[in-house]
Image: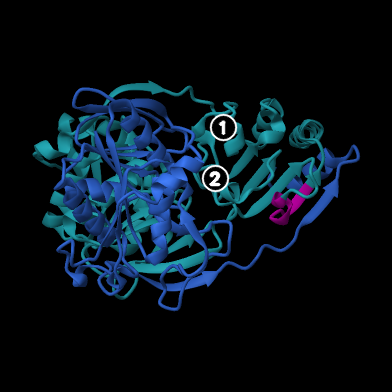
Chain colours: A cyan, B blue
Amino acid sequence: MAEVLVLVDHVDGAVRKTTHELLTIARRLGEPSAVFIGDGYDAAKAALATYGAAKVYRVSDPEVSAFLVAPTAEVLAQLVEQTSPAAVLLASSADGKEIAARLAIKTSSGLITDAVDVQPGDAGPTTTQSVFAGSYTVQASVTTGTPIITVKPNSATPEAAESTPAESDLEVTVSDAAKGARVTDRKPREKSGRPELTEAAIVVSGGRGTNGNFEAVEAFADSLGAAVGASRAAVDAGWYPHANQVGQTGKTVSPQLYVAAGISGAIQHRAGMQTSKAIVAVNKDSEAPIFELVDFGVVGDLFAVLPAATEAIEKHKA
Amino acid sequence: MKIVVCVKYVPDAQGERTFSSDHTTDRAGDGLLSELDEYPVEEALKLAEADDGEVVVLTMGPQDAGDAVRKSLQMGAHAGVHVLDDALHGSDAPATSLVLATAIEKIGESGAVDLVLTGMASTDGSMSVVPAMLAERLGLPQVTFASELSVGEGTVTIRRDGDASTETIEASLPALVSVTDQINEPRYPSFKGIMAAKKKPVETWSVADLGVDASQVGLEAAWTKVTEFTERPPREAGQVVTDEGDGGAQLAGFLTGRKFV
């Protein structure tokens, strides 16, 4: 069976859930070969085995992690040449897409980004994507080279398939051309303790209507175990970090439930959330476009409605 | 500094976007300079104003794409290049990057290019991959999603606001940088700018002018294909209530009823 390369998305060995999903998808297409770059392999090992990696290629050369994107693309290109895989799967993060993009040019291969499903086909994998702000669903496939596919979070339910991966260490040479860009400083964000926005099952977002006070939104989110998002207006006003922005120039999310509080529902915001399974909105303005999208909506003041809802939810849980 | 800004003319995101029968994006309707491309144009203008530099705006697209160049010139860019050729219809990202990279090299023939700027994504394809592909083809370091940018001696430094952290990233020039919508506030063209734009040089190049083979671009040459597209059915209208003191309770009821709690 052909190998399927999966680039492991991790922070110091803590493997992200998206990698579990990629390994699960890889098993549909061939034999998963995880590519682990950087430090912390001991921490990652178990997860890769749980989700069925048949092989792990390890790259510990610090030069690969020290420089942005380009060296990783070189490593993957080397592996593509060596293993002639059925596909290369990466997470649809900013780095994932850039690595995929450089790899596509290096290997003269087609690239499909932001797939929400990948299935085996007669002539290679077929992908599903949600395009034009979610108004269209597209099936596509790669017609040249090795299919390179970036996959959005929550595109597959991770399936455990315990394995004992064959581990090998890769020697790599990073070209000078790949050493052009590096991170010179990194200030970690404070962890909110809430789920990650693009992976969460429930997202509660606040907009202009919060007037800068996200307490009611946060308390409501916490009662549901939800991630907190923000509209562009809220981020531009400095009320919430850009990392939490939902919309065309922020994150695109497709959770089981999306609650929009004090958000009018302009197209740029809708582009980021309108494929959510269920949508709820609270807004003072009965004409707000967001109400066209909802399964349930409340016309009212979020400062009254959300705390009341939070209280009722906490009572229900007790 | 000589800066090239890549811009794209896209269908209006506020309108109904759809596919043509050949499975390509329907570009027949109203279009405009992609909103996200105004930011790199503005950033380029600020850099050029600081050191008496030059901003060349580059686009690839059908006839109407000239509007994207024109708007950029009205904002203050000095010159424009429009790669226009029927053979380009249906080009994928790799082919787009081939054309743009070749055009940038040709622009460089009349004076070395120090910096290539792009937006963070197009508002139609939304792949965010062309900048990286361009950097790969041009052999440049890429620095992307910049929310702040400064140029030093032979280097460019950016701030990137990632999910887990805020990073400072440095690259040696020449480099390719993509910028987010957080980086600046694009200026509106002034009346003077609109008038001045009419006299600014715009070159139109065909695929042959670039020395690119027509067989490497366009729909048939694409390395991926869309096999099917389906319009999502519109969402069924849901229930909207007005809060008269029990809005919160009703909301909670809806959520518990749907087992979200």
Residue under label 2: A247
Q: Residue at x 60, y 41 (%)?
A: A203
Residue under label 1: A235
The foreground one among A38 and B80 is: B80
Q: Is residue A6 above or below residue B54?
A: below
Position of residue B87 measured from the top left corner of the image (x, y, whole percent): 28, 72
Q: Does the magenta portion include A295?
A: yes
Residue A52 visible somewhere in the drawing: no
Q: Chain letter for mark 2, please.
A: A
Secondary structure at badge 1 equals helix
Q: Residue at x 20, y 60 (%)?
A: A85
Q: Chain letter for mark 1, please.
A: A
Magenta residues, start to end: A289-297
Residue A308 quadrant: top right
Estimate how packed mark 2 is, as few (under 14), some (14 to 19) or many (20 or more) residues with alpha carbons within 10 Å. many
The foreground one among B45 and A298 is: B45
Q: Do circles 1 and 2 both sit on a common chain?
A: yes
Position of residue A214 measured from the top left corner of the image (x, y, whole percent): 66, 27
Q: Residue at x 69, y 44 (%)?
A: A264
Label 2 near label 1: C-beta < 8 Å? no
Image-based side of B69 in relation to A234, left or right: left
Residue B24 visible somewhere in the drawing: yes
Residue A10 quadrant: top left
Quadrant holding the N terminus of chain A: bottom left
Amino acid type at image mark 1: Val
Position of residue B138 measured from the top left corner of the image (x, y, whole percent): 18, 47
Q: Is residue A300 above or below residue B126?
A: above
- Report how many numbered discs are placed on residues in the image: 2
